[in-house]
Amino acid sequence: MSRMVLIKLIIDLVMTILMFVEMAYYITGNRVHENVGVTLFGLFIAHIILNRRWFSSLLRGKHNFRRILQIGLNFLFLAAMAVMMVSGILISRDLFPLIPVKNDMIFRQMHVQTAYWGFIIMAVHIGFSWGMILNSVRRMTGITGTSRIRTMGLRILAVLIVFYGVYASFEREIGSKLTIYNPFGSLSNDDTSIKFVIDYLSIMGIYISGTHYALKFIQKQGQRQRGTTKY
């Protein structure tokens, strides 16, 4: 693995962790939330700079269904992050308190909603790259062969994560947080940092697993169609 690829993976991992911290606003408090947000903004800019060649290659090559979907998803994520960060600066109470904003409730609603949409889109984005991530982990850990038992175990784990993620989605009212009706939510009395992480990791697992296996299914269907065409 090249140093540049490793740097990109590390930045992406740190951004994912910080996104979790940002979602835990009622646990961390406002000052931590804003400081982490500024750090996340810096890493997001670094992520764009390190992947600038992707933008220059948008019009080159073949544009199949997967690539078109990925391009649209990346621009949606870019838009969500931009709105989330700009609205976050406008409603800041600690780091940027001197920016005068009237009726900041609208910006608060925009900030929270784009944060949750960004979280979901980020999970789908990871799902697109999950195969590459697994291959990178295999190379780093020295795993070269395949194992039916390991594969089956990982798939069972994925199913369990998805089932719990669906339960956590209802418990955390993720659906209402993605709409204009109840964007703010609250912290339950029995909530802990560990439970928060487990819940949101499981929710993220729904979209990572769903995207990964949906793309594998589409790829297999395409291979079958090409095989049928040959004969």
Image: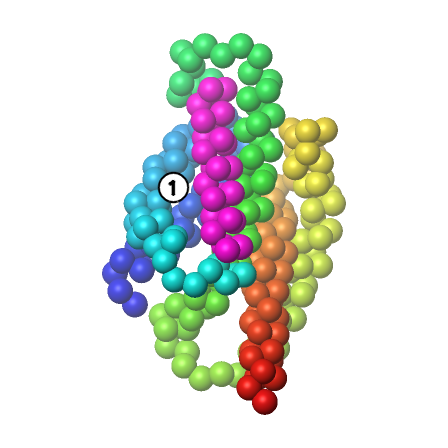
> For the C terminus, which image quadrant?
bottom right
Farthest residue, direction bottom: 231
Q: In the rendered image, which quarter is residue 182 located in?
A: top right
Query: Taking 195 as reference, is 33 above or below it?
Result: above
Residue at 57% x, 65% y: name it. 215
Which image quadrant: the N terminus?
bottom left
Q: Tag 1's secondary structure?
A: helix
Question: Where residue 180 sits: x, y (%)?
Answer: 68, 29
Q: How many marks on residues? A: 1
Q: Is residue 117 visible?
A: yes
- Asked whether residue 74 is drawn in magenta, I would say yes
200 with respect to 40 (left or right): right
Find the magenta span and give its range. 68-92
Q: How is the image coloured?
A: rainbow
Task: Left or right? Give the position of 82 relative to 167.
Answer: left
Q: Which residue corresponds to the image point at 56% horizontal and 35% vertical from the top-left?
A: 114
Q: Where is residue 118 in the image (x, y as percent from the top left)?
A: 54, 41
Q: What residue type is labelled 1?
A: Phe
Residue in the foreground of this view, choosing between 79 and 103: 79
User: Residue 41 or 61: which is nearer the viewer?
Assistant: 61
Q: Residue 34 or 43: which is nearer the viewer?
A: 43
Q: Is residue 32 at all visible to an observer of this figure?
A: no
Which percent across, then down, holds residue 162?
A: 67, 59
101 is higher (above) or lower (below) than 43:
above
Using the image, determine if residue 115 lies above or below residue 145.
above
The residue carrying mark 1 is 44
Secondary structure that dominates the magenta span: helix
